[in-house]
Image: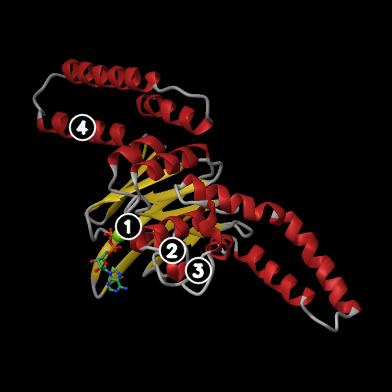
Amino acid sequence: MITVNNLTMSFGGQTLFKDADLKFTGGNCYGIIGANGAGKSTFLRILCGDLEPTKGEVIIPKKTRMSVLKQDHFAYDEYTVLDTVIMGNQRLYDIMQEKDALYAKEDFSDADGERAAELEGEFAELNGWEAESEASKLIQGLGLSEDILYSQMSALSGNEKVKVLLAQALFGSPDIILLDEPTNHLDIYAIRWLEEFLAEYFGTVLVVSHDRHFLNNVCTHIVDFDYGKVKMYVGNYEFWYESSQLMQRLIKQQNKKAEEKIKELQDFISRFSANKSKSKQATSRRKLLDNAASCWTS
Ligand SMILES: Nc1ncnc2c1ncn2[C@@H]1O[C@H](COP(=O)(O)OP(=O)(O)O)[C@@H](O)[C@H]1O
Ligand SMILES: [Mg+2]
């Protein structure tokens, strides 16, 4: 859960957004939309603590683990792909490094033995034994060969690096995942795989994207950055788009009779519900998407 209170961000006297109050809760996927320069990336950077807001606060409970899709394609050049993916869970990676250093010591003392036992315990708790196979699954899901795990990041092409950094953000079951334009430079197969992954994901996902199809397939909510205001809507992109178009039409047609307006709204809702029921599937996030229409009408 992320709570955002009264959040305001200005750069050099220009306000990007003002007094945003939002709650992001577990199990939901929030699509963040808005024009270029509206402040979407800045908003994510504030959430992950990379930037200080001008005003307001972000509250994230302690022990919540947040993963962020890294934007710097050269940051991991000196590491292997496997290490880069595992660094998605920094604590696990640090434990593995410390363990390796201990076991490599020639004068391994009793104290070292105790420390090693402690580390082994935490390693197991963090699912360390599964780390390599999880990394491999993510890498293969995104369409890369398993062999690439042992390559140096510096040897990879730009598109391969993008996929590795995405695998890093998804690695190790974080409670919150922040993704800024994750489908840029991804091929269609990798995008479909990511959609499936996010649709099944238990945690909270915030994703900035211009890809309407992608947003439709993964989002339970839409957060719209529009002229300094930030508003959250229940439902996927299609529902947000169609309903905001309809609202604008109805507002313009002030003289239209109330019954006609209600009829138009009802028609819209039944059309939307019919669309959604076709794709009804068993996962909880998909159920949430299906329920979005009824939230709007109640
Ligand atoms: N560190 C910074 N210093 C000054 N201006 C910035 C900084 N970061 C972003 N901006 C400005 O804030 C605006 C919003 O940027 P950004 O959050 O990247 O928008 P979006 O991701 O919605 O396209 C842009 O006009 C950008 O130039
Ligand atoms: Mg951006």
Residues at marks 1 and 2, CA–CA distance in whole angstroms: 15 Å
Q: Is residue 58 above or below residue 145?
A: below
Q: Say which residue appears at 32% left-offset and 53% top-offset.
A: 184
Residue 285 visible from this viewpoint? yes
Element marked by disc 1: helix
Residue marked by disc 3: 152
Q: Which mark is residue 70?
A: 2
Residues at marks 4 and 2, CA–CA distance in whole angstroms: 37 Å
Q: Amino acid at mark 1?
A: Lys
Mark 4 vs 2, N-terminal side: 2
Ligand number 2: quarter of image: bottom left
Q: Amino acid at mark 2?
A: Lys
Mark 3 vs 4, N-terminal side: 3
Say if disc 1 is inside 8 Å of ligand 1: yes
- The image position of residue 284, as x and y in percent, is 53, 31
Q: Which mark is residue 247?
A: 4
Is 218 on the left-hand or right-hand side of 145?
left
Q: Say which residue appears at 39% left-offset and 65% top-offset.
A: 71
Q: Residue furthest front?
A: 147
Q: Which mark is residue 252?
A: none
Residue 297 picture quarter: top left
How busy is the neighbourhood of tag 1: few (under 14 within 10 Å), some, or many (20 plus)? many
- The image position of residue 127, as x and y in percent, is 70, 53
Residue marked by disc 1: 40
Q: Say which residue appears at 60% left-offset and 65% top-offset.
A: 90
Residue sitting nearer the eye, 100 or 111: 100
How busy is the neighbourhood of tag 4: few (under 14 within 10 Å), some, or many (20 plus)? some
Mark 3 vs 1, N-terminal side: 1
Say if disc 4 is inside 8 Å of ligand 1: no
